Image (cartoon, helix red, strand yellow):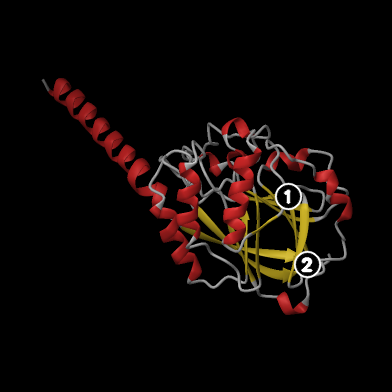
Amino acid sequence: MKRRKFIKNTVLGSAGIGFIAGLYSWQIEPFWLEFVNVKMPIHNLPKSLIGKTVMQISDIHVGNKFEYQHIIDSFEKAKLLKPDFVLYTGDFVSYESEEQLGQLKEVMKFAVTGTLGTAGVLGNHDYGEDWLEQDVADKITTILETAGISILNNQQKELNGLNIVGLDDYWGLNFNPNKIMPLVDKNKANIVLCHNPDVCDLNVWSNYTGWILSGHTHGGQVKPPFLKPPILPVKNKRYSAGEINLDDGRTLYINRALGNLYQVRFNVRPEITIFTLERFAKS
């Protein structure tokens, strides 16, 4: 009888733990925003920009797969930090139909912009079905630029002393880093935006040294404790989340995403990153 009672209690306890973990992963962590602070040493940084902040927002995924009021609420919290620069690294929608264009317009009424400049790049989901709809990307770009975000398609733009280089999405229709990377002036304070971090492994960088900001992975959204995420949408499974030294003068930072591709997260909280600019110290 004692053995039966022990088994029964064990089963009920396990079921209870599973229920609580499932509820947490569905209703709590997907909306539990974390502001992550990172120091960003930059080559050739003007003295006037030392101590200024760069906010990275990635993968907001406006659509029907989760309650996107979370994005609006997060934007309002982010504005309180008064960032100097704001950089968006793609996947503004989870596109299913033109409905998402209206939803994006509503959300971007609350967009976070920097006091010194705002820029971004598109992600694969911003190219519509199978990443093949140029008209969808064009309409999204118009919405974003109306909201004050300069979208860079294999282009660069200087924002008050900080030069932002934007690569179009690796899986999209217009990926062409060779159009811009050879033109990057290494004597400027440069940051590259690149939605998919797998691009870091391609021979397209023209000896660039400096920071690369990416998103795309969401950190896997589910990460068992002490283990790697079981699902990552990248070829190089090293590219999960956070700061990665690429050992060639480049530093990659992968944002865990503010939005959710699906409304489930475990041990991978949604993120907005705050970089504090400092001068790169030569060793």
Q: Residue at x 80, y 45 (%)?
A: 177
Q: Which residue is mark 1?
A: 153
Q: Residue at x 35, y 48 (%)?
A: 28
Element type where label 1 sits in the image: loop
* Above or below, 81 relative to 192: below
Mark 2 or mark 1: whose residue is earlier in sequence: 1
**Front residue of this view, candidates 61 and 196:** 61
Say which quadrant the C terminus sits in. bottom right
In the rendering, which numbered label is found on residue 19?
Answer: none
Nearer the observer: mark 2 or 1; the answer is: 1
Q: Is residue 26 left or right of residue 156?
A: left
Taking the spot 82% from the left edge, 49% from the top edge, the residue there is 248
Left or right: residue 17 versus residue 223 is: left
**Residue 262's image quarter?**
top left
Q: Please state the horizontal and vertical placement of residue 80, each as a whole percent of the image.
A: 48, 72
Answer left or right for 159 relative to 220: right
Residue sitting at 13 percent across and 23 percent down? 2
Residue linked to disc 2: 280
